[in-house]
Amino acid sequence: MLPLQQIKPKNARSKRALEAREPRQTENPKTALFLRYTTSSSLLTSLLTELHTLKRPHAIRFTKPNSIHPFEDASSLEFFCQKNDASLLVFASHSKKRPHALTWIRFFDGKVLDLLELGVVQDTARTIAQFKGEKVKMGLKPMLSFSGTAWESPTSNVYTLTKSMFIDFFRGAEATEIDVEGLQLLISFFVGEEGEGGVKPLIQMRCWKIVTKRSGQRVPKVEVQEIGPRIDFRVGRFREAQGGVMKEALKRGRGTEAKPKKNVETDLVGDKIGRIHLGKQDLGELQTRKMKGLKRGRDLEKNVDIADGEDNIGEDEHNEEEGVEVKRTRVA
């Protein structure tokens, strides 16, 4: 078996380019490419522009048509991604058999990882320009919402693949701290229940702007305003990644995993729950609240002790009458 050939850089520029493609402990924000087929509708051209706006600044768009069939031969797409150091791609195509189709593709190590084809419903599609009001700024990290039981399926299917694809596409750069004022964009995805005859439900994508207003209290009044784009997807063809390739893609480097803390857990909501272990407590020394009821109880105990003392005195007198010498203890 021949050893792998190592590419040696010829100058400083090529050296920097090779170092930028090397594996890293912390992954860079994923860049997305936007391409179109030789036949594409005006609706898809507008939606590519809208998606490119949501993905900026980590987005590159090509306007020249390309005769590529992703499900048949993706070698040209792999070349595009390697050339532009991108791991996501959205390909727009339109034909009589598959009208208004958007193909979402993920790459790993320069090769296609998985593919997903979603058809756009033309009647309900709306662009950002068709919504009035102020739009959000470029580069905001969006909040993602997935509503519907199909997203949480225990078995892998087209909807779990779609959820994973959308999270990778819209999540942006990782952030350790978040400014509340920057939480202005909400992207929601809703899917209904499966219809009769096994008809797959549509995937409804909506984009909202979060507006905060004065409420006269400490907590502001929160409202949502739809800003577009509004897209309804029909599920089409898809190809999942192979088990070994996906396992390799999900592998993390050493030292990146957080060390588990003893007696500290996180619930489903995300709140931290701590467990504290204490020694054995002596409840006899516990300071309780003084109450009248407790005082009465102590008075009754004193009365019982006095009565017992009188009984003992009576017995001593009886013993003296019988001639028995009794020694009495002196009471202070």
Image: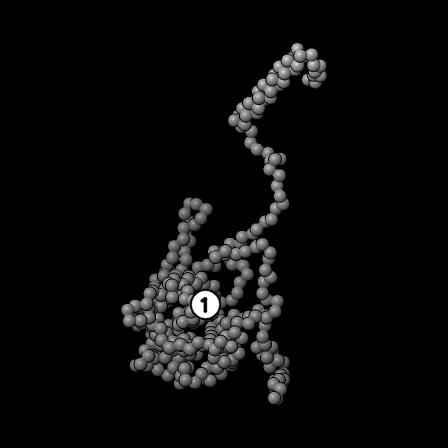
- The residue sitting at 43% across, 45% down in the picture is 217
Task: Quarter of the image for the C terminus: give it.
Answer: top right
Q: Is residue 313 left or right of residue 103?
A: right
For mark 1, what is the residue? 167
Figure colour scheme: one colour
Q: In front here: 19 or 296?
A: 296
Where disc 1 sits, the SS reads helix
Residue pushed farthest front? Answer: 322
- The residue sitting at 37% across, 63% down in the picture is 148
Q: In front here: 32 or 234?
A: 234
Task: Quarter of the image for the N terminus: give it.
Answer: bottom right
The quadrant holding residue 9 is bottom right
Q: Is residue 16 left or right of residue 107?
A: right
| Dot 1 alpha-carbon crowd within 10 angstroms: few under 14, some 14 to 19, many 20 or more | few
- Name the residue type under label 1: Ile
Residue pushed farthest top? Answer: 321
Q: Is residue 79 left or right of residue 196?
A: right
Image location (x, y in percent) of residue 296? 54, 24
Q: Do we see residue 35 in this rendering?
A: yes
